[in-house]
Image: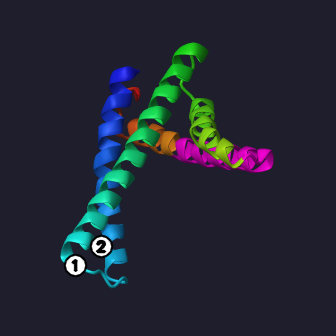
Amino acid sequence: CGATAVVNGINGAIVGALIGGVMALGESTQVQWPDARTRARHIGIRIGSTGAQFASFLAAYTGIRCTCTLVRRKDDVVNSGIAAAIVSGVPAMRTGNPSFVFMTAFTSAALMMAIESMSSASRSSSSSSSGGGGSFVY
């Protein structure tokens, strides 16, 4: 679980940095900057912070999902829902609003379970049509 979480965290950092860079470039054209150095600093901070957010989310999600698979001894959409609820619900606790925490966790879990369900259906139909019966491992 740890190695998979680290790999997904690194992948998340790369994707997050790319998305942060695009967002920062778009934002930086809408602001009058005092100089190029300040603009570059803003872009660098945005790239780093978005990369770190993606990395931490994906590493935590993967680690929790993998741990759920080991504890429950099942690899199903419920693990994805549990992981999504925890990863989104814990940061939402900072608001101090229990209904917001619940709705955030519930919505994230439902969305992740739906995505995982569609992904599983797609994998099973492609493996049955290609004749391969391999399993997907996280």
Q: How many numbered tags mark residues here?
A: 2
Query: Is residue 96 positioned above or below 135 on the image?
Result: below
Q: Which of the two residues, 10 or 82, is positioned nearer the viewer here?
A: 10
Q: Which of the two residues, 32 or 99, is positioned nearer the viewer here?
A: 32
Identify the residue at horizontal 78%, vertical 44% (top origin).
98
Q: Which residues are magenta?
A: 96-118
Give the mark, 2 or 1, whose residue is nearer the N terminus: 2
User: What is the distance, in whole Å, between disc 2 and disc 1 at their CAs?
Assistant: 15 Å
Compared across the picture, whether 135 is left or right of 114 comes to: left
Element under label 1?
loop
x, y (%) of residue 50?
Answer: 38, 54
Q: Which quadrant, please, contains the C terminus? A: top left
Q: Is residue 102 magenta?
A: yes
x, y (%) of residue 122?
Answer: 47, 45
Q: Which quadrant, please, contains the N terminus? A: top left
**Residue 128 badge:** none
x, y (%) of residue 11?
Answer: 30, 42
Q: Residue furthest right?
A: 99
Element under label 2?
helix
Q: Which of the two residues, 88 or 117, is positioned nearer the viewer here?
A: 88
Compared across the picture, whether 106 is left or right of 91 comes to: right
Residue located beneath label 1 in the image: 35
Q: Decide whether the magenta segment is chiefly helix, strand or loop.
A: helix
Badge 1: few (under 14), some or many (20 or more) residues near its Cα, within 10 Å? few
Q: Is residue 66 magenta?
A: no
x, y (%) of residue 126?
Answer: 40, 42
Identify the residue at horizontal 31%, vertical 66% (top origin).
42
Residue located beneath label 2 in the image: 25
Q: Amino acid at mark 2?
A: Leu
Query: Is residue 112 positioned above or below 24 on the image?
Result: above
